[in-house]
Image (spheres, helix red, strand yellow):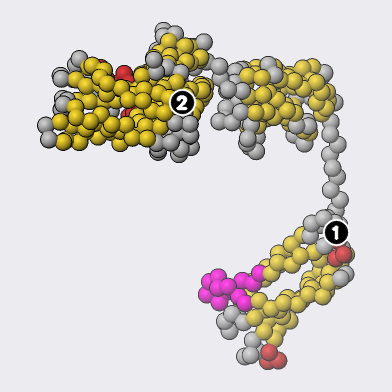
Amino acid sequence: MTEEVPVYQVVKAIVDSPLGPGAVALSINGPEMNFTEGGKGAFLSEQRYAYTWSIPFGVDNAGNHTLSLRYLHPEIAGGEISFPEQSMRVMKTEVKVKEEKIRFDQASVTPANGSIFTGFTYCVDVQSNLKNYDVELFTQEPGSTKWISQGTIPHNGTFQALCWPEVVIDGSHYGMAKYRFSSGLSASEIFEGPSIEPVSFINATISPSHGPLYITTPLLGEISRVYMYTINVQFMKPLAGNMKEVRLEVYDPSSESWLYAGSQTYDAAKTKIVFKVNFAGLPFQEPFLGETKYRLLASGEDLGEFIGPKIDVNLRNEQAIAQGKNYTYQLEVRSSLPKVNVALAYTKNNVNWLQGDKRTYESSNQEWKALKWEKYPKHYAYEFEVDYA
């Protein structure tokens, strides 16, 4: 045994007795040891029974010990049978710590920063008086505690640099990665790097940069332009081979969540794709004023996050109320602008739309106000259009 860890010695005895499984008492006497414990037999076959004990020995028990067994049964004269004593010697051993014979110097990773698609090169100088051993590289992703092996390189024991080229750091977090080297009992310190950064694959713009948010059931046809925002995506470099679908999401400030706004299949021959997003068709939790944002993803990987549009007018509760032969058209409006005009738009065939009379919203505290168009004829379809002119 060692000073740090006790050793458990297993003692086994097999008793052959026609009297059945009587108790067997084991006694051990020696340095700092005065052990006695009875055990019940486990059936083996016919009239044979097995008895087992596990006894811990520490450094204080080093030396000679005497073991004795007694078979206990009421049908035996005197109640027991004693077996010849046995001796056992407990010895202390020392664990020698192997000296480190491999030294790791000049560890480096290049480039110092990149993305999850960058191939990094790791190098280290090693010195050792050993020959023919392997050196292994381990990396740790940002935000993870798991070490991942990036493979081993054989080494002949002479001073030389070892390099692991084109190592890719996977993962879903940005930040500083880590790495280390190992060989047998020898290990390097833990090094920081590289810095994993978002991928700059694209640039995107949205038009208009500001506009209204309708809380309504959007109409089809030409009038749908009042709900639409156009996002132009320019590819700065080709996407990775596994990126087959480009997905657009718009942020909802009210629910603090991302809303699906469309997707397109990526073609490496394309340098540009265009999304037309009907904001009235997105399930915003409630109307909001102010700036939102959008992001693009490719097969789950984040391509970039962009600001816009700025919502400066909200429209809700559109109604057409019959009053005899005429109708009253109305809605509720609020705006971050102190003054804005809203026009009644209408059509006779859902193809050609006309812009009718306007009403003016004015407020200094962004309150909801009702705008009404009274005593107007019935229209085949109608909508309200914000007029920024």
So how many labels did they put on this image?
2
Question: What residue do we see at 29% from left, 25% from top?
Answer: 384
Q: Is residue 161 magenta?
A: no
- How crowded pointer 2 is (Cα within 10 Å; few <14, some 14-19, many 20+) is rated as some
* Residue placed most toward the observer, 108 or 217: 217
Residue at the left extreme, as displayed? 325
Query: Could you say which disc has been placed on residue 300 in the image?
Result: none
51 sits to left or right of 45: right
> For the residue labelled by badge 1, is the local secondary structure a helix, a strand or a loop?
loop
Measured as percent of width and height from the top left, residue 255 is found at 45, 39
x and y percent of residue 51 in the render? 64, 72
Q: Start and end of the magenta stretch? A: 40-52
> Quarter of the image holding residue 148?
top right
Label 2 vs label 1, nearer the camera: 2
Nearer-the-camera pick, 382 or 374:
374
Residue 46 belongs to the span the image colors magenta = yes
Residue 349, percent from left and from top: 15, 19
Pointer 2 residue: 337
As helix, strand or loop, the secondary structure at mark 2 comes to: loop
Q: Earlier in the sequence, mark 2 or mark 1?
A: 1
Tell me whether circle 2 and circle 1 mark residues in contact (CB < 8 Å): no
Residue pointed to by mark 1: 91
Amino acid carrying mark 1 in the image: Met
Please indicate whether residue 187 sits to the left or right of residue 115 in the image: right
* Distance CA(mark 2)–CA(mark 1): 90 Å
- Residue at image position (82%, 23%) is 105
Q: Residue at x 55, y 30 (%)?
A: 172
> Label 1 crowding class (10 Å Cα cut-off): few <14, some 14-19, many 20+?
some
Q: Residue at x 70, y 25 (%)?
A: 193
Three-letter amino acid code of the residue under disc 2: Leu
**Quarter containing the N terminus:** bottom right
The one of 322 and 303 positioned closer to us in this rendering: 322
